[in-house]
Image (spheres, coloured by chain):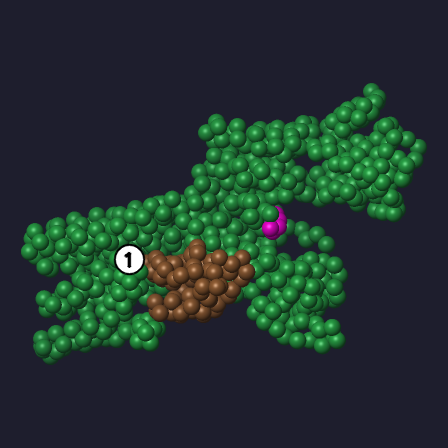
Chain colours: A green, B brown
Amino acid sequence: MKFQIYIQKHTTQITWTTAALIVAGFLSKYLINSTVFYQIFLAVASIIAVIPIAIHAYQAIRAKVISIEFLVTVAVVGAFIIGEYNESAIVTFLFLFGNFLEQKTLSKTRESIKSLTEMAPTTAEIVQSDGSIEEVDIDDVDEGDIVLVKTGAAIPVDGVVVEGNGYADEAAVTGESREVNKSLDDEVFSGTMLSDGFLKIKATKVGDDTTFAKIVELVEDAQDTKSHAEKFIDRFSQFYTPAVLLIALAVFIFSRDFKLAITVLVLGCPGALVIGAPVSNVAGIGNGAKRGILIKGGEVMDTFAKIDTFVFDKTGTLTKGSTSVSATKRYNDDFKQTLALTAKVETLSDHPLGRAIMQYADDQKIDYRNLAIRDNQTVKGQGIIAKIEDHQVLVGNMKLMTAHQVMISEQQRADLTELQGTGSSVVIVAIDDQIAATFGVSDVIRPEVAEELAALKAGGAKHLVMLTGDNQVTANYVAQQLGIDEVHAELLPDQKVEYVKQFQDQGRHVAFVGDGINDSPSLATADIGIAMGSGTDVAIETSDVVLMQSSFAALVHAYKLAKKTVLNTRENVTIAIAVVAFLLIGLIAGFIYMASGMFVHEASILVVIFNAMRLINFGKKNDAKLAPEVVHG
Amino acid sequence: MNKKVILQLDALTCPSCLTKIETAVKAEPGVGEVKVLFNAGKVKADIDDQVTSAEKLSDVVTKLGYEVEKVKVKDL
């Protein structure tokens, strides 16, 4: 056992020794004309080089797998028996050297993931109850522990700041390298770097539960989630290697040509075919991961590349997500009270419109937080009904008012139409069954979106659709601004799913782009669910593609990357098949033997890896676009 | 199956190593689902800790000739 491990650890040295022996052999043949030395050198080279290969072959046989190494070992032993030392030496050397290069180049394609995992800190400094500091292994940190992080260190847990101030670089979880200010009560994430300052953090998630650990796990799994092509090749190669063995045997039985038979063994190695597809996916997924784009595996890559319809959920996706109150219409004398009651109701919701109104109330220095809510009920797709102090308050849309028989005057109706015409979302407030006010809340359309949507179309998207819970007028306004082809407004979450299904029935390949919070059903139903701009657990789990930053440039990059990766996979499979055909013709025509066959075989493996490596740098020149937007507080 | 064992190996380079490791680990008694991540160089296996242990699996993999760099055990 020790011997096996020793050999495996020193395979590189063995490779170089073999090379030196082969060179020595040829030198003695041509310089001092000694065929004896030539034979001895090459025989020794063969014996040394075949050992690591044979060990692998043996281990595989024990696991009931006929591996490529087994084919090579049989071929080399065969060549050795008939005294073809030069063939056996060169074949083994090329095989080992090929593996060595494969290892080097493969690790290049995996680099982006490796650099990701290396960002994870291995120790943490815990603040003890007596104030002293103890450094512990990262696995020993518990939720609730207070962790100290100093300038230049990586934050070891997900948590909230309890003391201190600083700037964190959150590239590890958002894909965008920018400094975000962190102070009391701010959330911080494991794997991000504290580039300046000093923080004490109360751990809320540790170890494998942190967002960062989830991302790493997801990407690792993704790289090994096989595409259909890969699964097919896997199945194929399971039968392929034994088949090659049988064919070689048949060749020997019928032709009685031992050399031809062992040549078949070497040529039969499925190398480039096996490695070609996975290596493209690894490089493609790695490219995305580096930019905060998580694509969950080869199959997702395939499907994503076929997408022709993108469906967007408006709230927060196409718009800036930072909404603000842009207009108010007042219908009673005490606007302050109306605003206070409305803001209080909105504390019950997490809706962006609600946040805008709370912000507005805060700005007006209205004190609403101490009001008492006696009773409340949320009506999906309509709004909220609440009893505050002794008032019955309705906050929501037209549907809510109609459902509760609140009368709306001609003037109020005209005001509504006017507000909606400006692209605002409208929140209607009724207090004790009287309309008290309406708030126009505008979603600021993201400036770069129109341009990026055009790029998406140029990249191959045929239909851009917006499904939204907002009213028709607002939806139309936004769609028109952005160049969206089809709009469906005033929808409930399950109606959005219906639309997605309808598009699929029409034979379209649908991607649903949402924020991953309210639209899980649509994300799951669509061929590809894309969660945008949030690293929340739900988003990571329910979607197929996660864009860590809320950027349309990332969406465009992901789409183009998927297409490019699928094309790259196809190229690799084509190269591999062409090589097999070439070797077969060469064998029949008689210009390919063992050593040259092994050379072509190893060369083809490197060609497919190099081809895949082109994906690593895909889109590099556009990276400026993925750079930070405006930093919000 | 009550524990999940994660073994971090050296980089894997041949796709056939994958089948080899998977078959060998699966053959151990008390082992449920086994997943070998080729690119991450990880083996993930569900085990019953009454029957087998992380050390045992680590041993199996080492015997196949792959160095185990790190062992992690989680509750399922």
Q: Nearer the viewer, residue A416 or A270?
A: A270
Quadrant (top left/top right/bottom left/bottom right) for the N terminus of chain A: bottom left
In the rendered structure, the answer to whether residue A51 lies left or right of residue A433 reads left
The residue positioned farthest toward the right in the image shown: A333
Q: Which residue is mark 1?
A: A65
Majority SS type along the magenta span: loop
In the rendered structure, the answer to whether residue A494 lies left or right of residue A463 reads right
Q: Tag 1: Cα neighbours inside 10 Å, few (<14), some, or many (≥20)?
A: many
Q: Tell which subunit mark 1 falls on.
A: A
In the rendered structure, the answer to whether residue A27 lies left or right of residue A173 reads left
* Residue A142 pos. (x, y %): 64, 65
Q: Is residue A72 above or below residue A224?
A: below
Q: Is residue A455 above or below residue A572?
A: above
Q: Is residue A323 visible?
A: no
Q: Say which quarter of the image contains residue A111.
A: bottom left
- Please tell me whether mark 1 sits on a helix, a strand or a loop: loop
* Residue A614 pos. (x, y %): 40, 54
Picture residue at 72% right of the left edge, 54% below the top:
A633
Q: Is residue A347 visible?
A: yes
* Residue B16 pos. (x, y %): 32, 58
Q: Which residues make up the magenta segment?
A: A532-537
Q: Is residue A232 magenta?
A: no
* Residue A424 pos. (x, y %): 73, 33
Q: Nearer the viewer, residue A309 or A255?
A: A255
